Image (cartoon, grey):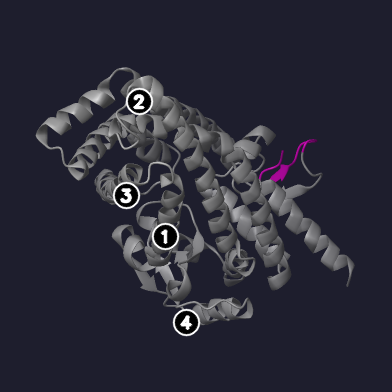
């Protein structure tokens, strides 16, 4: 294997991919293996935590203790939510610190200070805690007042929350963690806005996000819904990518909006949510007769809901990832056709593989189970085939 060129194996398309750093690939594979093991450990610990609450009697004990302080349902639910999730968060601190801070620094991906990581963790925990408390209060209010149809109302509520969050993310949520500023390069900004206009998408400007304060990885996105939609580029992208490469990356993101992937994703999320909540309803009704819970609205039965939700999520992840890879593949095709610049697509993907420490060709089972995008090697090979076909028609 020569420096700067990776030859794919017999299980991969028969093509060479220039520019891929073999040393970075070895690191990427090592890093990926560690992350998969940590993911498995995280799932095992989460399952053990939920089962401990359910079968040790801890869940009922916490609810009874809270009930001695106040019989007000809102207080009991809030107190239970606080104890359950704070204790879970404390248990996950060592794993979260190793996964989110130690490991990325070890592999040269993170630039974040320890203080910065702690601050972001507190901010993220506070935001997640507020949303979790809201969802739990609504969930148990519905369980009390609509014990047979709560799952349908809950699905509608979660749909509303997701749309609101997606709409407000660029203006309320992102600024909590990142500094956003208008892109100073007016020529590039105009070029990207024109690209969005050609795709039939309205955006409210082009912004730069200070990714370099936390990571060496690069990214770009189209954020927001309706009147809040805007183009956001990581400053790590601006530093190392040409305008042509940035344009192809954005064209891919625009494709999701052109193909109505956001709307389809919402529809599928609603159907998925309805199904999993209905299964949770059946599991809860079954457990009430056997585990001695007082009523569907008994917050002590929450570990049953958590087990069903978590288990169903793990089982359906390969299906949702397969759907995601299909849509991402369509977006790649759109970007290639729209820009007509396969060489920029290829060079940007090669840079992203090297910079983000991505595995060029993951094991097929890993891609099938865990990847939301096609393997980088597959995306590059497709662009190379597109380029050969285009050159052959001249």
Secondary element type, mark 4: helix
> Mark on residue 138?
3
> Mark on residue 239?
none
230 to the left or right of 29 = left
The quadrant of the picture occupied by the N terminus is top right
Q: Residue at x 10, y 34 (%)?
A: 69
Does the stretch in magenta take in 6? yes
- The CA span between labels 2 and 4 is 52 Å
- Eye-nearest disc, 1 or 4: 1
- Which of the two discs, 2 and 1, labels the residue nearer the N terminus? 2
Secondary element type, mark 2: helix
- The CA span between labels 2 and 3 is 24 Å
Q: Residue at x 55, y 64 (%)?
A: 241
Residue 195 percent location from the top left of the image: 60, 77
Residue identifier under label 4 = 186
Query: Crowding at label 2, few (<14), some or many (≥20) Cα neighbours within 10 Å?
Result: some
Residue 97 percent location from the top left of the image: 33, 36
* Residue nearest the observer in this picture, 329 or 267: 267
260 to the left or right of 99 = right
Residue 113, visible in the rendered structure: no
Residue identifier under label 2 = 49
- Which of the two discs, 3 and 4, labels the residue nearer the N terminus? 3
Secondary element type, mark 1: helix
The image shows residue 275, relative to residue 339, as above or below, that is: above
Residue 388 percent location from the top left of the image: 83, 61
- Eye-nearest disc, 2 or 4: 2
Q: Are marks 2 and 4 in contact (CB under 8 Å)?
A: no
- In the rendered structure, which segment of residues is drawn in magenta? 1-11
- The CA span between labels 2 and 1 is 30 Å
Residue identifier under label 1 = 160
Q: Are marks 2 and 1 in contact (CB under 8 Å)?
A: no
128 to the left or right of 200 = left
């Amino acid at each position: 294997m020569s420096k700067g060129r990776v030859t794919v194996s017999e299980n991969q398309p028969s093509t060479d991919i220039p520019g891929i750093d073999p040393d970075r690939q070895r690191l990427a594979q090592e890093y990926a293996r560690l992350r998969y093991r940590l993911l498995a450990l995280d799932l095992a610990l989460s399952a053990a935590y939920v089962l401990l609450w359910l079968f040790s009697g801890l869940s009922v004990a916490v609810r009874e203790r809270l009930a001695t302080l106040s019989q007000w349902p809102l207080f009991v639910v809030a107190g239970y939510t606080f104890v359950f999730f704070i204790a879970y968060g404390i248990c996950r601190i060592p794993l979260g610190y190793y996964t989110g801070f130690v490991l990325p620094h070890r592999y040269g991906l993170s630039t974040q200070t320890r203080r910065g990581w702690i601050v972001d963790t507190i901010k993220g925990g506070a935001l997640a805690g507020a949303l979790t408390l809201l969802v739990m209060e609504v969930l148990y209010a519905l369980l009390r007042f609509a014990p047979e149809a709560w799952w349908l109302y809950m699905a509608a509520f979660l749909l509303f929350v997701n749309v609101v969050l997606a709409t407000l993310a660029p203006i309320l949520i992102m600024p909590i963690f990142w500094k956003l500023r208008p892109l100073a390069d007016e020529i590039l900004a105009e070029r990207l806005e024109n690209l969005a206009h050609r795709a039939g998408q309205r955006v409210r400007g082009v912004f730069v996000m200070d990714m370099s304060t936390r990571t060496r990885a690069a990214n770009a996105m189209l954020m927001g819904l309706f009147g809040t939609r805007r183009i956001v580029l990581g400053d790590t992208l601006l530093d190392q990518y040409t305008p042509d490469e940035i344009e192809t990356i954005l064209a891919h993101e625009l494709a999701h909006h052109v193909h109505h992937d956001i709307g389809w994703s919402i529809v599928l999320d609603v159907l998925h949510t309805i199904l999993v909540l209905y299964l949770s309803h059946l599991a809860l009704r079954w457990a009430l007769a056997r585990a001695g819970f007082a009523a569907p609205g008994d917050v002590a039965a929450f570990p049953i809901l958590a087990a069903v939700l978590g288990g169903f999520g793990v089982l359906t992840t390969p299906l949702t990832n397969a759907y995601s890879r299909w849509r991402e593949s369509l977006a790649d095709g759109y970007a290639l056709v729209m820009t007509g610049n396969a060489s920029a697509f290829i060079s940007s993907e090669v840079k992203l593989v090297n910079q983000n420490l991505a595995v060029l060709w993951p094991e097929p089972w890993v891609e099938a189970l865990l990847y939301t995008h096609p393997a980088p090697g597959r995306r590059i090979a497709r662009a190379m085939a597109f380029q050969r076909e285009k050159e052959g028609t001249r």
